Image: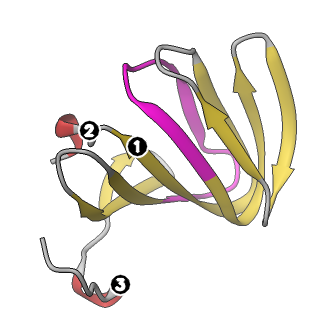
Amino acid sequence: MPSLIEDQDIPWIDIEPGIQRKVMAHNEHMMLVKVQFSQGAVGTLHHHPHTQASYVSKGKFEVSISDSKKILQAGDVYFVPSHEVHGVICLEDGELIDVFNPAREDFL
């Protein structure tokens, strides 16, 4: 994996209706992923063994983690411990920057 990465060099991959992602950088210990959402798109509730930190770079999202829900917008962050059930609903076209530890091999 190169150390200097240009956004334009990585294609978007459609993963769900209204949701695209691109894996920006990774090694076995960490992964950074950009995820674009259209208004109304749903990041379905799910869980995984990876720890996740997500930065809302654009838009507005209803974020659910376990039994908590909150509306977050550009500049906000959420943190998901390993195995916690979580998901989002995009309220305004937006983008999340997700960091996973360790890297998500299922995204490669």
Q: Nearer the viewer, mark 3 or mark 1?
A: 1
87 horizontally vs 26: left or right: right
The secondary structure that dominates the magenta segment is strand
Q: Amino acid at mark 3?
A: Asp
Q: Nearer the viewer, mark 2 or mark 3?
A: 2
Is residue 48 highlighted in magenta? yes
Q: Position of residue 102 (x, y in %)?
A: 30, 37
Q: Which mark, by number, is residue 100?
A: 1
Q: Is residue 10 above or below residue 20?
A: below
Q: According to the image, label 3 marks what residue? A: 7
Q: Which mark, by number, is residue 104?
A: 2
Gap between marks 2 and 1 measured at Cα: 7 Å
* Residues shaded magenta: 35-54
Q: Nearer the viewer, residue 31 or 35?
A: 31
52 horizontally vs 6: left or right: right
Circle 1 crowding by C-alpha within 10 Å: few under 14, some 14–19, many from 20: many
26 horizontally vs 16: left or right: left
Circle 3 crowding by C-alpha within 10 Å: few under 14, some 14–19, many from 20: few
Determine the secondary structure under disc 1.
strand
Determine the secondary structure under disc 3.
helix
Q: Amino acid at mark 2?
A: Arg
Q: Amino acid at mark 1?
A: Phe
Q: Position of residue 25 (x, y in %)?
A: 27, 65
| Sequence-first tag of 2 and 3 | 3
Circle 2 crowding by C-alpha within 10 Å: few under 14, some 14–19, many from 20: many
